[in-house]
Amino acid sequence: MDAPALKAARHALREHIDRHPWIECLSATLLLSLLTLLVHGASLQGSWRWDDGAHLSYAAQYTPWQYFLEPHVAQGHSSANVAPWNLLFYDINLSLFGMAAAGHYAHLLLLVGLGAALFYAVLREWVEPLPALIGAVALLLGKPTAHIAAGLMHGHYATGFVFAMLSILGWTRYLKGGRGYWLGLSALAYLLATTCKEVYVPLVVLLPFLPVGTRPQRVRALIPFVLIALVYIGWRYLLLGRLVGGYSQGVFDASEALRQLLRVPKLLLGSKPPGNILAVVFLGLLCLAAVKRRLHAPVFFVSLGIVLLPLIPLTAFPGIHSPDRYLFVPWVAFSACLAVVWPRETRPVFALVGGAALVAALAGVHAQEKQALRPNLAYWDTLYRFALSLDKERQAIFVVPEFGGTDDGYKRFVLTRARNTADLFAPKPQPGDLHVVDEKGRGLEQVPLATLQLFEFRGGDMVPMPPERVAEKLPSLARGQPAQSVR
């Protein structure tokens, strides 16, 4: 087929899709859903990880009414943040799936895929299909998204992102001449997003700067969002007893904060190929878009502030040292910016080739992060599976401060809470307590040494500890009584 015929066929297809926009929407949704399963589907085989035990126990113990509105219950969950949807995510899943982790992960991946599809729909309000798709694919292949899809404790981030995208979509549709229900949907979605995580509260600052509608229209439409933000402030004060939350540990240091913030691009993209190549390409596209005046300066700088300001307190504690959930919003901003700065005048064949190369680079960055994360996930999967299945009368767990959880009693706490919650859903739960001992001997005083065998994680599995290994890891025990008594 010659070039004119190809061009005519392409225009005919474009006109057909323009007359039936649901075709594009459905195609993009199916493609992004497939990509979600392809790159994050391994989570469906995962077990509980990290903080899951604590959240499962708290969600099973209290009702949504309590952790949404009662200060002592909310502070018992977190005295630093207001994120009750974190517990509601577990609550919903426990009601639907019990302690079947696969169902919980299916819910999480549904949210991740839906968030990507809505992100595509939002980008399509301003850019063409290909750059919008590139932005949505970049979102799914980002390192922070890999962390979120790998952990149920991040479910409220994924949920909040879905609500945030619904809010932006409703806002733009209303200001483009849509009916009032679009504004109602937008306001309701914003309200729900604020209950998921604080990072979505500043959306009220971004909305009036988005290039849609007239300034008077945006000001009038913003009124319900300002009211919601004010209600949020009062609700936050009710639950925390103060307006400013955040972690109380750590001491803020301006130079250290600057150092960590400057490392964010390196954390997101890496310092090796293909990440560094991707960074150079992105900077080139950004400069080209700026020269051609295709960047909307107010949105760019407001977004930059929304992205960076919440990170500053985190530099004191826990610190920004990995591309985890704390960098999810910066990655969303990067993905959106990538779609906006994508060249518009490129010939279709070159655009497709360039897009494919860019996606390949993103896939390489994603693969590097998944490889780095794999030992951590394997450790927690193995630890939780053993904790939920061991014989309480004959087996106990020995843990060391690897793969996170270095604070006193953290792993003992989450593992015992997970087993207690599992017992609530078991037809005939085994009586007794789960015993977990750490490297400092905490928890040892509760272990009946004459009847229990200690197990530790080694070589990818939980293995029994021989007496000499126990003596090596717990010298105080070896001095106090014969190691042979720990069988």
Image (cartoon, rainbow, N blue to C red):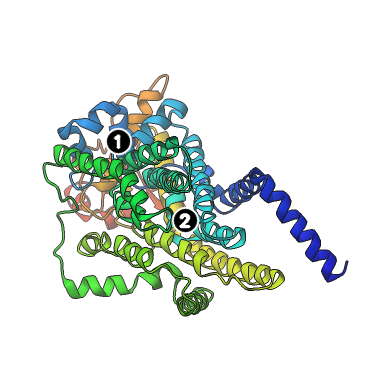
Mark 2: few/some/many CA within 10 Å (<14, 14-19, 20+): many
Residue 78 x %, y % = 22, 43
Residue drawn at (31%, 31%) of the image: 59
Figure check: 463 above or below 98: below
Label 2 sits on a secondary structure element that is helix
What is the distance, in whole Å, between disc 2 and disc 1 at their CAs?
Answer: 26 Å
Figure check: 94 above or below 202: above
The number of discs equals 2
Q: Is residue 84 left or right of residue 152?
A: left
Residue 355 x %, y % = 62, 68
Residue 256 x %, y % = 21, 73
Q: 271 and 193: which one is in front?
A: 193
Residue 208 appears in the figure = yes
Q: 144 and 415: which one is in front?
A: 144
**If the image is split into quadrants, where does the N terminus sit?**
bottom right
**If the image is split into quadrants, where does the C terminus sit?**
top left
Residue 304 x %, y % = 33, 66
Residue drawn at (55%, 69%) of the image: 342
Residue drawn at (42%, 32%) of the image: 93
Residue drawn at (33%, 67%) of the image: 301
Q: Quadrant of residue 425?
A: top left
Q: Quadrant of residue 163?
A: top left
Does label 2 or label 1 sit earlier along the sequence? 2
> In the image, which disc is placed on residue 417?
1
Residue 434 appears in the figure = no
Q: Is residue 414 left or right of residue 71?
A: right
Pointer 2 with pointer 1, Cβ within 8 A = no
Mark 1: few/some/many CA within 10 Å (<14, 14-19, 20+): many
**Viewer-nearest of labels 2 and 1?**
2
The amino acid marked with disc number 2 is Ala
Q: Which residue bears the numbered disc 2?
A: 146
